[in-house]
Structures are given as structure tokens and as C-alpha cells.
Image: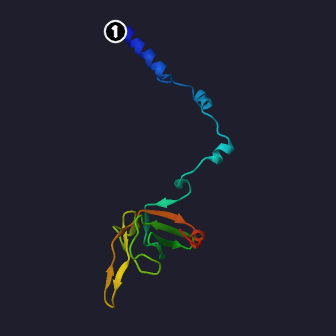
Amino acid sequence: MRASAGLCAVLLLGLYPDAGLAQDPEQRKSAEPELTLEQILSQQLGDADYVDETACVNMDQVKDTEVLDEHHVVFRVNRNEYWLATIKMRCPGLRPGVPVQFEKRSRSVCQGDSVRAPFGMTFDEVRWGPACNLSRFQSITPEQLALPGKP
């Protein structure tokens, strides 16, 4: 029995040479390849590396909202802070210049909350369109907001 246990340990060490062996931190450091500046700069970055996102925007701090199109609403918090809300599916009736209604669960508007655009208005009544779920909030700059063809 003792011989078979020793054989198992040898086989495991053969398959996994680092198993059970504590390496000196200096040995591990030298085993990891050092990246050059050129290699670091040539690496592709994901959206998260470029974009500041949040789950909610506090409506008490929002000064203005602007509908950009059927997929995007901008929340202006101050003159240099804007949050772009994205709606995955086309939101019928949502277009620049129309008033919107937010359905939210708190004082903040959050991912999963919804926005509605008017579908029809009379002198005494507004019929609101379907609820469109907000999926993400990204920080944008005033310069990005001013770009033609935004977002």
C-alpha cells in the first residue's frame, strides 16, 4: 500500500510539477515574463478600460434630461457631468424634444428602470407609450455630447 501511495505522488508531481512545491517569490517573479512598454501599449483594451459606468443616477442632482434618439437619453448633472442612458430595444415614440416619464423604484433612476414617451396627447390627457428598460449608464463629456452623429 505504501509503495502505491508513493507512486501516486510521483505521478502527480510528473503531471503537475508545481504541485506541492512552494516556490521562492523571487523565482516566481523571474519566471513571469516582463512586458515591454511597446507590448503594453499594443494590448487591446475593453470598453470598461475607457468608460466610467454607474448603475444609477440620482434624480435630485439631475438638472436636465435630453432625448437623443430611440435608444439614448442624456442626464445632465452639472455643466461637466453627463450620463448617457442606453435602451437596448428601440423605444417607440422616444425622440428629441418630446417629454418623457421615468418609472423608478427610488429617488434615482437605475438600470432596469424604464422610460416612456407620449403616444398621443389631447388638451387634457397624455397617453404614454410602452415602458422601455434602461440598460446602462455611461459617463460622457460635453465634447462627446456635441459630436455630430452622437452617440
In the rendered view, does 123 fall on the left or right side of 62? Answer: left
What's the image's color scheme? rainbow
Where in the figure is residue 3, as x and y percent of width and height? 39, 8
Residue 129 to residue 37: above or below: below
Residue 10 to residue 113: above or below: above
Q: Residue at x 46, y 61 (%)?
A: 54
Circle 1: element type:
loop
Picture quadrant of residue 113 = bottom left
Where in the figure is residue 140, as x and y percent of width and height? 54, 66
Which residue lies under the disc numbered 1? 1
Where in the figure is residue 70, as x and y percent of width and height? 44, 72
Residue at the extreme bottom: 123
Picture quadrant of residue 87 = bottom left
In the rendered view, does 1 fall on the left or right side of 18? Answer: left
Where in the figure is residue 137, as x and y percent of width and height? 46, 64
Q: Residue at x 64, y 47 (%)?
A: 42
Instruction: Pick the residue in front: 60 or 4.
Output: 4
Instruction: Pick the residue in front: 69 or 6.
Output: 69
Residue 105 to residue 99: above or below: above
Which amino acid type is marked by label 1? Met
Q: Residue at x 49, y 60 (%)?
A: 53
Quadrant in which the N terminus appears? top left
- Callout 1: few (<14), some (14-19), or many (20+) C-alpha neighbours within 10 Å? few
Instruction: Pick the residue in front: 110 or 36.
Output: 36
Instruction: Pick the residue in front: 54 or 50.
Output: 50
